[in-house]
Amino acid sequence: MKTLDAKLNAIHADPHGSNEFIIADAKDADMAFGITAPGPYQNGACKHGYHESEGCFKTLEDYRNQIRSVVRQELVDIVLLSASNVEQLAIREGIFENSPITPAARANDTTDIWVVRGGKYPTHHPSRSFRTATLDHIKYGRLETDHNQPFTGADLGLYSITFTNEIEWDYQALQAFHDFRIEAEEKRFRYFLEVFNPNVNPGISDRKVSAFLNDHIIRCLAGVTEAGRPIFLKIPYNGPGPLEELVAYDPQLIVGILGGSSGTTLDAFQLIHDARKHGARVALFGRKINLSEDPLTFIFYLRQIVEETITPKDAVEAYHSELRKRNIKPHRPLNRDLTMTTNAVSYR
């Protein structure tokens, strides 16, 4: 059994007593950022001649090598990919066949994650629903009529929705979510639900945004029976109170948090610690892992923190010690990396 399934079973069997925690590495950023998704080359290691002010960016093969190394490490429970990388890594290479890690694919790409250079979609326009990937191609790499046959890709996907308090856009987003759920149930496809804070001004005070988000999550799932419900949520960490409210409302609704922007190492380590403390059972970190100096060591300490074998500050110091041993230059000196800056809650 994959570790994801074992942990989900344990959490559902004992929502208040289980200590299981699911970590996902979100390597689906190519469906949001395009060429910049793998991150910049460090220390002048650029492999091609094009440079710009943001840096010189790694290639698709570099990105896939990062994914292969994370799968070999076997410390995360899910690796979230684009459909094209599911095809290459899961279907063609079979790297998940004998792995405890579950592959997943981003099943839709709403406009608020179109974070292309020069673009203004995430900040200037209310989120609109859109799906590039199809469930057939995620599972089989092709169109398929028999979804009962064994799949070689992934039967798990992320579906994203952003409520903006704009009736036309939210109505269309909910209709698209309805259509997706029907198709997913017909095609034996599981999903987890990502719900962002509004990506444009929702016309309410900042202090009400978390309540707006919580109410929308419960409201839109209240009419969904077990067969069509997400296996867990992925939401921004809006603080301990809003998280505890959502977790307490329905213990069978597993709540996870997203990582947001990269920030300092303490930002990441403290976030996963605080989210776990206040009821989250899943964390999906993308850029915090991908843009770290040593992603595998970074993941190792994320796991140690949720298993409560080390504190966030001690983990930052241990992480820097490992960087020194590996002769890896840190992005920041230790004293700066031990400071809290901000944990942005949008995909940007």
Image (cartoon, rainbow, N blue to C red):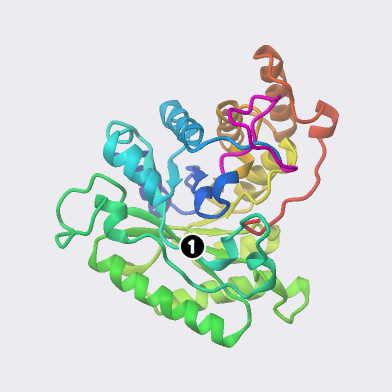
- Residue 83 position (above or below residue 146): above
Where residue 87 sits, quadrant-wise, is top left
- Identity of the residue furthest to the right in this view: 335
* Left or right side of 246 for 211: right
The image shows residue 83 at horizontal and vertical percentages of: 38, 51
Q: Residue at x 68, y 49 (%)?
A: 261
On screen, residue 263 above or below 105: above
Q: Can you say which quadrant of the picture contains the C terminus?
A: bottom right
- Residue drawn at point x = 55 percent, y = 50 percent: 34
Outermost residue to the bottom: 167
Mark 1 sits on what residue? 109
Stretch in magenta: 37-54
Q: How many discs appear? A: 1
Residue 205: quadrant of the picture: bottom right
Residue shown at the point (65%, 54%) measured from the top left: 117
* Quadrant location of the N terminus in the rendered image: top left
Measured as percent of width and height from the top left, residue 250 is found at 49, 66
| Residue 177 seen in the figure | yes
Spot occupied by residue 218 in the image (x, y as percentages of width and height): 51, 74
Estimate the x, y position of residue 25 in percent, counting from the top left. Answer: 51, 42
